Structures are given as C-alpha cells and as structure tokens.
Amino acid sequence: MFSLLALSPLAASDLYPSRIPDDERDTAQRAAKLVSKQRYDDAANLYRVIIQEHPDSLYGWFNLGVVRVRQGEYAAGRTAFLHALTLAPNDEMCLADLGIVESDTGHAEDAVKYLLAALKLLPNDPTTHEYLSQAYEQLGRHGDAQAEEAKAAELRKGQGMFQLQDFEPDDKTRHSS
C-alpha cells in the first residue's frame, strides 16, 4: 500500500545538493549507493553518521526518514520527517512525504494537514494531489477526494506535453524516388 515519493528517497541529494554538508558528500554518496542496492540498514547507519556530525542536517534527517519508511519502520520514519520539519518547516518534500506516511498509516486528518501545506508550496504536483484524495476518502469526504483525483489527472495529462512522438509519414508525405 505504501509507495514513497512522491517520495523519492535521496531526492534531496539530487534536487538540493547544497543540503549535504560539504564534509559529508562522500558519506552521502555511499549511502545513496546502498539505498539503490536496498541495503537500508547500512544506509541508515551512514545517515546517522551525518546527523551525529551535523545535527541540523535536513538532508540527513529527511533521508533517514525515507530509508526507515522503505524498511516498513513507519514510526521511525515519521519521527525523522518530523525532526526534519523542525529544521525546515516549509520544506515541500518533507511535508509531502510526512503526509504520505500519515495517509498510509491511517492518520488521515494529519495527512490532510501536511499534504495541504505541501500543495501550497508545490501546487502542481499530481502525486501529492493523489495522496490528498486518498486521505479525503479515508475521512469520508468523497467530493473533496474526487476533486483532488480530477486535479491529479489533469496535471498528469499536462505532463505529457512537449514529448516527441514517433513519426510515420502517411502516403501524402512520402517522397517517391
């Protein structure tokens, strides 16, 4: 049932390289490789090293949360995301991912709170709208759920724009030799 990122683990390193403390870039790179190999305990240990050296590292706390959730340790992931939010209360990735955790663990009211906050910062993210729809369904707010699902579908449709299409000329455009 749980499908993280929206949550892309380690998306913080790709999207926000400035969040990685300079002296921890090698550690962060090693942790990312471990995650790609699904060696979550080892990766979590490296994120803890980053946090021990840099207790205010949004990168370390966020990615520790992602890794823990991927391991099915939702409470530990939630705790890490909440700590990350104390460091950056308006971080759209933390808000969205925490909202997803809350939704997938049955805490729909909290999910709505975090997902709405994330959408204020990132209004055109279809995945966040989909999770908000799920949380509204859990609360029995079917009309709101349908509206969010429609918004997500509309946004996803727009993502297909400006993509190359295969071209097969019809008989009118073929040149005869």
Image (tube, grey):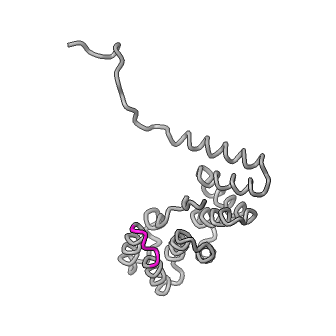
Quadrant containing the N terminus is: bottom right
Quadrant containing the C terminus is: top left
Residue at 67% across, 66% down: 105
Residue 108 in the figure: left or right of residue 174: right
Residue 11: give x, y in percent of width and height. 47, 64
Reply yes or no: does residue 142 show up in magenta.
no
Work out which residue is located at the far right of the displayed protein and give it.
Answer: 140
Report the front residue among 61 and 100: 100
Q: With respect to residue 169, does 157 lie above or below?
A: below
Residue at 35% across, 13% down: 172
Q: Within the image, what quadrant is residue 29 found in?
A: bottom left
Q: Which residues are magenta?
A: 37-41
Residue 154: give x, y in percent of width and height. 61, 40
Residue at 41% across, 74% down: 31
Report the front residue among 123 and 173: 173
Residue at 75% across, 57% down: 138
Work out which residue is located at the far bottom of the displayed protein and give it.
Answer: 52
Work out which residue is located at the far left of the displayed protein and give it.
Answer: 177
Residue 5: give x, y in percent of width and height. 54, 60
